[in-house]
Amino acid sequence: MKISPAIKGIITAALMTGIILLIYNMGKNADTRLQYAVYGIYALGIVWTLVAFRQTAAYTGTFGNLFSQGFRCFIVVTLIMALFYGIFNYSHPEFAEESSKIYKEQLLSEKNGSKTPDEIEEATRSYKKGYNMAVVYGSIFGYLIIGVAVTAAISVFLIKRKE
């Protein structure tokens, strides 16, 4: 049975969200290194897509041919993960609250004292208001960069390996 790169992306994203939810449910007892498992699954999903495509008749042996298949996988993962982070953080406003408190403490601890208390309060409110959007933007950018890097590296490796 042939599974399309988009479906492989959906499967990969489902596994990634499962690991994230597992880490979240473990709470403070979770080992922070478990977060790297999410990136490992992401990379393995892309590798799965590329290796499986390499074994088909449609494979031409070109970088672009392989990269386009990896792109179809990682773009789906990126979109699903951005949606997941948006919904997850929206449903947990305490994340924005906690992060804005840390940001406020950083502003208060600055040595130069260039901001007034009112400016610090306004900066903290703005930070909290934009928190969810910043998390989503960061996830999109991060997953795209990782997806491009893994896809390009594995594509080159698979092409060179054939020679």
Image (cartoon, rainbow, N blue to C red):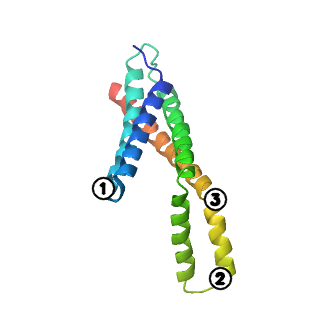
Disc 3 packing (10 Å; few <14; some 14–19; many ≥20) = few
Q: Are marks 1 and 2 in contact (CB under 8 Å)?
A: no
Work out which quarter of the rendered image holds the C terminus and state it: top left
Q: Residue at x 66, y 65 (%)?
A: 126
Tell me which numbered mark, 3 or 1, is placed earlier along the sequence: 1
Q: Is residue 149 left or right of residue 48?
A: right
The circle on residue 152 is none
User: Is 106 above or below relative to 142?
Assistant: below
In the image: residue 152, left or right of residue 115: left
Residue type pointed to by label 1:
Asp
* Quadrant where the N terminus is found in the figure: top left
Report the residue marked by disc 1: 31
Return the residue at label 2: 117
Residue 26 visible here:
yes
Query: Looking at the picture, how far across and down is residue 143, in whole percent?
Result: 50, 44
State which tag comes first along the sequence, 3 or 2: 2
Which quadrant holds residue 97?
A: bottom right
Identified by mark 3, the residue type is Gly
Secondary structure found at label 2:
helix
Q: Residue at x 52, y 53 (%)?
A: 92
- Which residue shows up at 40% across the image and 51% down it? 24
Q: Amino acid at mark 2?
A: Pro
State the SS at label 1. Answer: loop
Q: Position of residue 124 (x, y in %)?
A: 62, 70
- Cα–Cα gap, marks 3 and 2: 20 Å
Looking at this view, is 142 or 27 the one in front?
27
Across and down, in percent, residue 104 comes to 56, 74
Mark 1–mark 2 Cα distance, whole angstroms, equals 37 Å
Describe the element under mark 3 as helix, strand or loop. helix
Q: What residue is drawn where x is 47% and y is 30%?
A: 10
User: Which residue corresponds to mark 3?
Assistant: 130
- Alpha-carbon distance for marks 3 and 1? 28 Å
